[in-house]
Image (cartoon, rainbow, N blue to C red):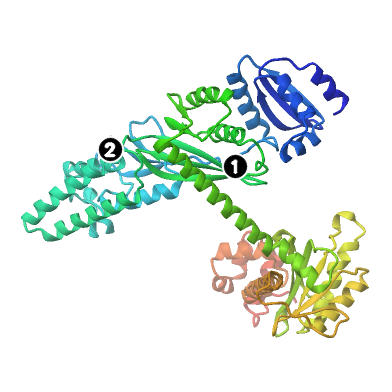
């Protein structure tokens, strides 16, 4: 605690408001309090801080406060400040997507079902929001199979009938564009779609069953079979929807799961009495914080953008003094009634327990994924260091490979892995300049010389960092040439070679090779680096080879550069036309002068000396 903080602490008022913790002028945390004096002092006088708070306090060099009249006012101000400054120690959700809707414009003569990102006041019916575009497309695909509505963007009705499309031929459209149905017949299907989207499945299936029986009575068995299949598809879709209530509830259900490091927040979306989906949100550094406060901050962040709260918000528990303010804030966000409920028993409590179960599962999966990622990257680098006898874990590992075709287009590649992960921006290509032909040893020697020379460039801006470890694709001979080149440039970096036959590791000044277990993450890391270097070299080599094979005859004309070649081709349209052109025509081409025209004419007519100067 410095003098500035001590002086400000002594002047704190007993008032609600917001506080901004700063480190060297930068806001690192924004909070609110019913009593600023008690809350802010607790950071500097308390000792039983959670790890996150302790870390934050150690960085605070100053703080500011903003007084408010009520706690609700402080809550609204806190939301605005977090959104403005995005402080490091606040919960910050990265998800800024707009949840999509299904749109059905009933003002059109032949409505179609479309996806909409926002709900507009245009007279159309909107259903949703759905949890992600994938969920909407699944519903749209189901509608396409169940109900033969058009999916085209034609403005109907048109002046004349069009040719039926494939959807009509396979029974996926009634064909209003080609006059295959009346507007009344089409509207009947639209009404079924509306009932389907409203969740009135029984009405839809009852209507289809009635039509099926009528078709069967009229001996239209193919039509009856199609209707029967539609009924089965709808019933199957109904079974996949988990019914939890019969009251048509609209609820957002929140829960939280914590471990010693992080937390995972879970949201379940209940619409029309059914769970439509859910989202999980990882909350780093919140594992040991008060769960009620974490959940409160998360809910505020969750609804801060364009999400609208459901009519009822369920959560397992919140700090008592702020739950009322949160409910009022949720009503403002929705622009209507919202009930904030902390259920203790019954179906609603079962919902929060289900959300907690999902949060726990998501946190376990995230931790497992992080563990696997660690084992593949940093863990593999640690194991590799032990295998080859390094006294520290390599942070930057570079891999090299040579590629050529019978000595032509001789190139090399350098790939870089940082902390066990590829860093493509650090990759480099090399074209072998010191000789021609196939000589992998000399090529490796040249490449390593050029690379390590960059480490000691006179201009600091041109210097490259020294690697911690170098992988050479090859055996002891390639390794020896690479090591000699490195040492000539004044560097001494650990280096090893990897032979492909048995995946043997060769170290300098060691006769015996090292074999690592084929299931070891360290060997898998080495193989990834080797394969990436090989891929990068081959890709570069193929590009050069492709350029070499595409050669224009105009490139053989002395004194005719790329600009004039382009101008000639644009003017004459083909090389053949250029060959057949007279000298006067060549001079008329854009960008040509008399010497250039004579050079082109001489190239096209080597036997004719008239275009050449004597």
Q: Which disc number belongs to residue 108?
A: 2
Residue labelled with disc 1: 94
Residue 553 is at least partly visible in this image: yes
User: Viewer-proximal residue, 474 or 583?
Assistant: 474
- Judged from the image, the secondary structure of the residue bearing numbered disc 1 is loop
In the image, residue 8 sits, relative to residue 592, either above or below, namely above
In the image, residue 427 sits, relative to residue 183, either above or below, namely below
User: Viewer-proximal residue, 150 or 366?
Assistant: 366
The x and y percentages for residue 108 are 27, 38
Side of 475 where 68 appears, left or right: left
The x and y percentages for residue 251 are 42, 35
Of the residues under marks 2 and 1, which one precedes in the sequence?
A: 1
In the image, residue 610 sits, relative to residue 63, either above or below, namely below
The x and y percentages for residue 106 are 28, 36
- Judged from the image, the secondary structure of the residue bearing numbered disc 2 is loop
Q: Residue pushed farthest left?
A: 218
Q: Which disc number belongs to residue 241?
A: none
User: Viewer-proximal residue, 113 or 368?
Assistant: 368
The x and y percentages for residue 47 are 78, 33
Which of the 4 quarters of the picture holds residue 270? top left
User: Viewer-proximal residue, 322 or 568?
Assistant: 322
Residue 157 is at least partly visible in this image: no
In the image, residue 64 sits, relative to residue 610, either above or below, namely above
């Amino acid at each position: 605690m410095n003098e500035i903080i001590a002086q400000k602490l002594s002047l704190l008022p007993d008032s609600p408001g917001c506080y901004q913790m700063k480190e060297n002028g930068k806001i690192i945390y924004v909070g609110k309090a019913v009593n600023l004096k008690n809350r802010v002092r607790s950071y500097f006088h308390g000792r039983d801080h959670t790890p996150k708070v302790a870390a934050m306090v150690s960085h605070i060099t100053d703080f500011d406060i903003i007084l408010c009249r009520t706690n609700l006012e402080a809550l609204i101000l806190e939301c605005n400040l977090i959104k403005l400054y995005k402080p490091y120690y606040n919960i910050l959700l990265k998800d800024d997507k707009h949840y999509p809707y299904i749109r059905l414009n009933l003002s059109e003569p032949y409505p179609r079902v479309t996806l909409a990102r926002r709900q507009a006041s245009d007279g159309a019916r909107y259903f949703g929001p759905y949890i992600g575009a994938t969920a909407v497309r699944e519903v749209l695909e189901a509608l396409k199979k169940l109900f033969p509505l058009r999916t085209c963007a034609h403005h109907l009705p048109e002046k004349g009938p069009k040719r039926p499309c494939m959807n009509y031929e396979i029974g996926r459209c009634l064909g209003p564009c080609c006059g295959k149905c009346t507007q009344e017949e089409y509207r009947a299907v639209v009404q079924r779609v509306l009932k389907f989207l409203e969740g009135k499945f029984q009405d839809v299936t009852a209507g289809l069953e009635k039509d099926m029986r009528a078709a069967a009575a009229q001996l239209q068995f193919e039509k009856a079979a199609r209707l029967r299949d539609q009924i089965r598809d709808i019933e199957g879709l109904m079974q996949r929807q988990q019914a939890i209530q019969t009251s048509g509830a609209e609820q957002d259900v929140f829960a939280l799961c914590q471990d010693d490091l992080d937390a995972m927040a879970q949201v379940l979306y209940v619409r029309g009495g059914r769970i439509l989906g859910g989202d999980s949100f990882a909350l780093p550094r919140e594992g040991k914080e008060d769960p009620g406060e974490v959940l409160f901050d998360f809910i505020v962040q969750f609804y801060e953008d364009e999400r609208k709260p459901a009519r009822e918000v369920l959560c397992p528990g919140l700090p008592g003094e702020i739950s009322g303010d949160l409910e009022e804030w949720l009503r403002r966000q929705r622009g209507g009634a919202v009930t904030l409920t902390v259920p203790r028993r019954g179906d609603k409590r079962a919902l929060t327990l289900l959300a907690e179960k999902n949060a726990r599962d998501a946190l376990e999966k995230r931790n497992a994924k992080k563990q696997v990622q660690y084992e593949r990257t940093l863990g593999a680098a640690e194991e590799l260091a032990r295998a080859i006898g390094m006294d520290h874990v390599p942070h930057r590992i570079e891999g090299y490979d040579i590629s050529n075709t019978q000595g032509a287009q001789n190139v090399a590649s350098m790939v870089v892995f940082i902390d066990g992960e590829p860093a493509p921006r650090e990759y480099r290509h090399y074209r072998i300049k010191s000789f021609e032909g196939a000589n992998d040893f000399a090529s490796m020697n040249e490449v390593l010389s050029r690379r390590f020379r960059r480490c000691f460039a006179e201009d600091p801006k041109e210097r490259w960092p020294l690697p911690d470890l170098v992988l050479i694709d090859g055996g002891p001979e390639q390794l020896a040439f690479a090591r000699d080149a490195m040492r000539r440039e004044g560097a001494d970096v650990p280096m090893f070679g990897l032979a492909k036959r048995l995946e043997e590791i060769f170290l300098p000044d060691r006769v015996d090779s090292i074999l690592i277990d084929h299931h070891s993450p360290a060997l898998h890391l080495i193989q990834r680096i080797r394969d990436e270097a090989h891929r990068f070299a081959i890709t570069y080599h193929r590009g050069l080879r492709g350029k070499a094979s595409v050669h224009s005859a105009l490139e053989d004309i002395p004194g005719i550069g790329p600009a004039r070649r382009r101008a000639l081709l644009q003017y004459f349209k083909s090389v053949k036309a250029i060959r057949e052109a007279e000298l006067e025509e060549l001079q008329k081409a854009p960008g040509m002068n008399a010497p250039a025209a004579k050079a082109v004419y001489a190239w096209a007519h080597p036997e004719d000396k008239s275009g050449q100067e004597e």
